[in-house]
Amino acid sequence: MEANDEVSHSFIMHLPDDCLCSIFEKFDSSIDRESFGLTCHRLLYIQDSRRRSLEFGCSFSRVNHSLSTTTIDVDSLILDKLIRRFQQLESLSLCGCVNLLDSGLSQLQNHGSKLHSLYLDCCFKVTDTGLSSVAVGCPSLSFISLYRCSITDNGLKLLAKSCLSLKDLNLEWCSLITDSGISAISNNCRQLRALKISHCDKIKGVGFDGCSQTLACLEAESCKLEPEGVMRILSGGGLEYMNVSSLGWCIRGDGLQAIGGGFGSNLRILNFRLCRSVGDETIMEISKGCPLLQEWNLSLCTEIGVVGWESVGIYCNNLEKLHVSGCRSLCDQGLLALRNGCKSLSTVYISRCRQVSSLAITLFKIARWDVEIKLEEVMCIMPNRFFKR
């Protein structure tokens, strides 16, 4: 019996790597896959070579961007060994590794060529030096999240020169980034489709000049975009989703009118939540100039009057979802205009509208029985297809 086992073991060890890889791929359960590598060093090597993703089990959540008091202390030496061991990685997540140093990413220069996705959220000590290692070693990168990293325009320029296939880029709370870095990304990464720059208050928007038509999604919450910058953001003509909620203006005037000037004709979803400077004139321009608009969040836009709501009702014929919670200037007459228009409307999110009577809401429900009235407020309306793992 023992002789037969030895013959069987010897036979397996003489199989070429591609046969062993095929055997490994046939295992359905994770337990079987892990057991495969425990057999011997060669099968462990085969197992390691088939690993495509690595994620540290830290307490950081990419959904709500929260960190618990317990964080992971990732040793650069351990990370170095893991990157050497798993050289076929396509996805690497180091989210919440708050003590990760630039040196920890150095091995990506030698073993990051297959990497497509990299998550460095809340890696506070990662700077341009670490990002340069990523740029040099990960030319195939299509997704990178740098949420709250300490990077500057210099790091972005290095990334833009090397990672030409970049499609999704998260720069939320990267407070040192300016339009110079955005310009480098816009000019070099011509496949870019989704970008987050929320809370980057040094970005005015002018760096988007000449951006690619592939740019379809922009998150720019709590930014200080200028009217000229809004025009540059729209210059590619392909934007489908745009979030400029809590917008702070650097100069006087309502620059969002540019969205209705032609470049925003492809927009499907707009988030204007807490844009208190938006008035009737802007709403009229956008209602006329964005015929494909399907969802519009106007919650807490307090200066929209009857004329603005009437224009939404008349011109937004493809609008399916409308958010009006906290719109203190919305009254019964404005709700009537929405009731009589917006023929494709399916859902209205409405709450805390003090000038709207319960009778007006009841009449709306009777006349538009096919429209769902939701007494709630939705914060995020970005389509799921963007920034998808």
Image (cartoon, rainbow, N blue to C red):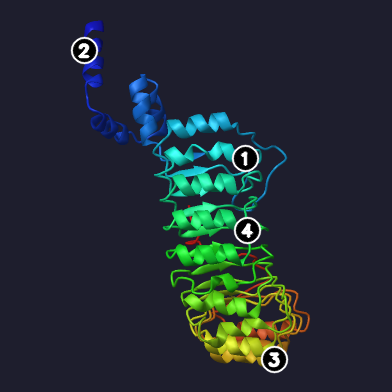
- Percent x, y for residue 212? 45, 70
Q: CA distance from mark 3 to mark 4?
A: 36 Å
Do callouts 2 and 1 mark residues in contact (Cβ within 8 Å)? no
Circle 3: residue type: Val
Circle 4: residue type: Glu
Tell me the crowding category of disc 4: few under 14, some 14 to 19, or many 20 or more residues within 10 angstroms, Cα based: many
Q: For mark 2, give the secondary structure.
A: helix
User: Of discs 4 and 2, which sits in the foreground?
Assistant: 4
- Percent x, y for residue 104? 56, 36
Q: Is residue 278 above or below residue 126?
A: below
Among the two numbered marks 2 and 1 on one chain, the one whose residue lies closer to the N terminus: 2
- Percent x, y for residue 71? 67, 38
Do callouts 3 and 1 mark residues in contact (Cβ within 8 Å)? no
Residue bearing the label numbered 3: 306
Residue 301 visible: yes
Number of marks? 4
Circle 2: residue type: Val
Among the two numbered marks 3 and 2 on one chain, the one whose residue lies closer to the N terminus: 2
Among the two numbered marks 3 and 1 on one chain, the one whose residue lies closer to the N terminus: 1
- Tell me which corner region of the image, top left, top right, bottom left or bottom right, holds residue 69: top right
Q: For mark 4, give the secondary structure.
A: loop
Residue bearing the label numbered 1: 97
Residue 341 visible: no
Residue bearing the label numbered 4: 172
Residue bearing the label numbered 2: 7
Furthest-right residue in view?
354
